[in-house]
Amino acid sequence: MAKEKRSRQTAANADKHLLYQKSVQCPEAEVAFFNKVFRKKRGRKPMSMREDFCGTAFLSTEWCTSHPERTAVGIDLDEPTLDWGRQNVLSKVGTDVSARVSLHRADVLEGLGPNVDITCAMNFSYFIFKQRQQLIEYFKVARRGLKEDGLFFCELYGGTEAIVDLKEKREFKGFDYVWHQSKFNPITRETLCHIHFEFPDGSRLKKAFTYDWRLWTIPEVRECMAEAGFSRTEVWWEDIENDGKYHETGSEENQEGWLVYVIAER
Ligand SMILES: C[S@@+](CC[C@H](N)C(=O)[O-])C[C@H]1O[C@@H](n2cnc3c(N)ncnc32)[C@H](O)[C@@H]1O
C-alpha cells in the first residue's frame, strides 16, 4: 500500500515529455503508415527520413529501430527537448540504432541534412507558420530536401469543433490528458491551444505545452504545396468510426473532429 502511494504520479514528480509520448504519440503506427504508402506509390522500401520539429526524436528512433539500415535526421529548435530525447529515448535503444539517428538543433527552414525518401512534420508543428509566404517557403525547403521520388507527410486537423473553445479530457494510466482550445480568431484563423495533465491526487501540470498556431485548411495547405513546387498532393482521412486506419479520398462528410495526412510528391 505504502509502496503504491510512493510511486503514484503527481504534478510534482511527473515528466511532461513522457506523458506527451504516452498520450499523443504512436510512432509504431506512423512508421507502418509511411512504409505502406511509400511502398504502394514507389514500389520500394523507404530507408531515410527527416523528422522536422522532431521534439524528443521518438519517431526518428522508432524509424531506425524498425529496420537495421534505416537512417533518420531529426531537426528541432529546442536544445533541452533534444537533450531529453538523447537521454531518455536514444540511450534506451543501443548504439546500433542510435548511431543512425542524427539530431540537429536548427530551424527547419535551414533544410539541414542529406536528401531523404520521406520528410514528415507531425502533430501540426508547421502551423507555427502563420503567413502564406512562410508556409510556402517551408514547403519549398522540405521539397528540396527530398530525393527525386521522395514524399512529404504532414498532419492537419479540423471539423466543426476545431474552431470552438473547448477542453477535451482523455484518461490514461495514472493521469488524464486535457486538450484545451482556448482561443480561435476567425479573422486570422489563429488558435491558441494547450495540453494540461491532471493526476489522481488532484494536482495538475497546467499548460505543459502551449501551441500558438494558424489553423490552416486542407485546400490552403494543398495550394501552398503546389506553389512550393510539389507535383501532386493527396489527402488521407482517418476512419475514426472503423479501425482508425487512413484512406486516400477527395470527398468526406464533415465531422466534429477529423484528422488527415496530406501527402505531397516531390
Ligand atoms: C508540436 S511539437 C512536435 C513534437 C513531435 N514532433 C510530435 O510529433 O509530437 C513542436 C516542436 O517543434 C519545435 N519547433 C518549433 N519551431 C521550430 C522551427 N522553426 N524549427 C525547428 N523546430 C521548431 C519545438 O521546439 C517543438 O519541439
Image (cartoon, helix red, strand yellow):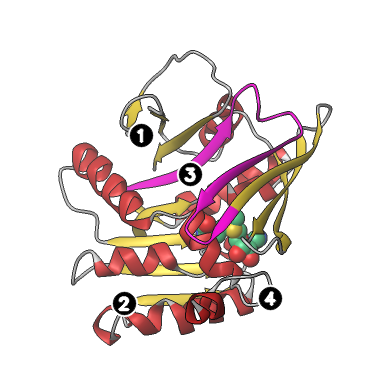
Q: Nearer the viewer, mark 3 or mark 4?
A: 4
* Residue 131 position in % (x across, y down): 74, 41
Q: Are marks 2 and 1 in contact (CB under 8 Å)?
A: no
CA separation in Å, label 3 and label 1: 17 Å
Marks 1 and 4, the one that precedes in the sequence: 4
Residue that appears at 62% across and 78% down: 79
Give the overall secondary structure of the magenta segment. strand
Q: Which residues are magenta?
A: 149-176
* Total marks in image: 4
Marks 2 and 1, the one that precedes in the sequence: 2
Q: Are marks 3 and 4 in contact (CB under 8 Å)?
A: no
Marks 3 and 1, the one that precedes in the sequence: 3
Q: Nearer the viewer, mark 2 or mark 1?
A: 1
* Residue 53 visible in this rendered orientation of the protein: no
* 79 lies above or below 216: below
Name of the residue lying farthest toward the front: 1
Q: Which residue is mark 4?
A: 12
Q: Which residue is mark 1?
A: 244
Q: Which residue is mark 3?
A: 154
